[in-house]
Image (cartoon, rainbow, N blue to C red):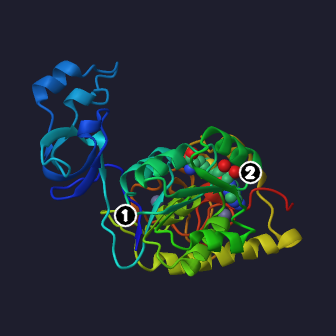
Amino acid sequence: MWLHPAPFDIHEGDDVYVWLRSDRNTGRAKVLSGPIAPDPAALAAAQPLKTDGTPERPRGDVATRYLVRYAHDGSTCSVNEARIHRVYPRNEQPTVIVTFDTTHYRRLARSQVYPPDSVLELGSSYGLCTTILHEHSNGQVIGIDNSSLLVKECQAKYPHMQFECVDVMQHGERVDALLQGRTIVFVDIGGDRCLEDVVAVLSFIMEKMKEVQLIVVKSESLVRDLEERDCVRPDGWIEDAWWPSIHQVVKTLQGQALLGSDRPKAEPWYLTAKAAQFVRKPSRYPSRVTADGQWICRVHNYTRAGCPKIDACAYNHSVCHHCLVDGHRALHCPIDGPPA
Ligand SMILES: C[S@@+](CC[C@H](N)C(=O)[O-])C[C@H]1O[C@@H](n2cnc3c(N)ncnc32)[C@H](O)[C@@H]1O
Ligand SMILES: [Zn+2]
Ligand SMILES: [Zn+2]
């Protein structure tokens, strides 16, 4: 079961973790009702307008709130949605939560981990997320990283916590040993890590783990693939067919890499546009057609949000406008220069 949740997707009856500054109001809770929309008069009074007349973001005191009941003492409280984190139910099958954002990743460390969980963190870096995991698992966390410098720094700074220098791409045996007995794995070996590496690490974990109930992974390339192939449902759950299909995507990418000197070269106008981070208007790129003569949509290929018309647009949305290969957008075209 795969999940790519929107950060603030809260409903009546949800189990949540409320994170407020005071200890008394921090902890597990249930959403009783909401959302309680901010009072329009208070909103108007508190909300400064921007020069174009549109409101700024709502301030904390007038933001959307939910009524929650705390598990520890049964008291209720109306809480700003930004302070409420959903706690996803654990199922028979392990859940994998995918995010691309460090703040969300750390929110998940705070909200999804609780005793008697035991956590392995791949890519512990400066130990910032490790300290959150340590707090929420009663100290049952090991952080690993392939940078011996970072590991030494963490060991010195947090002597009560466990860190080990392991390269997850190379020391499979050690990772396997560390996985045993763990219920949760957090994976962040660099948010911009290529799809092939992330898929390899996740496949390895899923093959070796026995008791793992939850994997949380931070990866831009996974999220990009999910979004490009439109595999996330509105409630955040990911289509079952997605993970099996990703192995084909990886094979195609590896095939392109293996082509070596036969690998196609990037078009000069594409390299210029890429260097400028694709700021020019989509219509300024050359008009191009697919092998079977369909015009290729440039809005789909060169804007991050993609083509807003989707089905109503008569142009082709599957082939890359740059290399004409199926399955990715020109924004993310892997053919970006002469072969290495
Ligand atoms: C973006 S940082 C992780 C930040 C962390 N999630 C946090 O919230 O503070 C990624 C870390 O992964 C580590 N890393 C990269 N490749 C790795 C590998 N093959 N094995 C282990 N660690 C790796 C890097 O050294 C880096 O410290
Ligand atoms: Zn279009
Ligand atoms: Zn391409």
Residue 292 lies, in percent from the top left, at 60, 77
Please give the name of the residue rendered at 34% of the width and 18% of the height, measured from the top-left corner: 51
Q: Residue 294's image quarter?
A: bottom right
Name the amino acid, label 2: Ser
Q: Is residue 250 visible?
A: yes
Mark yes or no: residue 202 visible.
no
The answer to whether residue 135 is left or right of residue 283 is left
Say if 336 sits above or below 195 in the image: above
At 14% from the left edge and 24% from the top edge, which residue is drawn?
Answer: 42
The residue under label 2 is: 147
Q: Amino acid at mark 1?
A: Ala
Q: Residue at x 40, y 57 (%)?
A: 113
Residue 266 location (% of width, % of height): 77, 58
| Residue 13 left/right relative to 165 | left
Circle 2 SS class:
loop
Along the line of sight, which residue is nearer the eye, 85 or 51? 85
User: Which dot marks residue 276?
Assistant: none
- Name the spot of residue 35 as percent of width and height, x first: 16, 46
The front one of 174 and 259 is: 174
Q: Residue furthest front?
A: 160
Name the image quarter holding residue 120.
Answer: bottom right
- The disc at residue 312 is 1
- Residue at (24, 22) in percent of width and height: 47
- Foreground tag (2 vs 1): 2
Q: Secondary structure at mark 1?
A: helix
**Front residue of 31 and 38:** 31
Cα–Cα span, label 2 and label 1: 50 Å
Ligand 1 within 8 angstroms of badge 2 C-beta: yes
Which badge, 2 or 1, is on the more N-terminal residue? 2
Contact between labelled residues 1 and 2, with CB atoms less than 8 Å apart: no
How packed mark 2 is, by other alpha carbons closer than 10 Å (few <14, some 14-19, many 20 or more), is: some
Compare residues 158 and 123 and report the one nearer the observer: 158
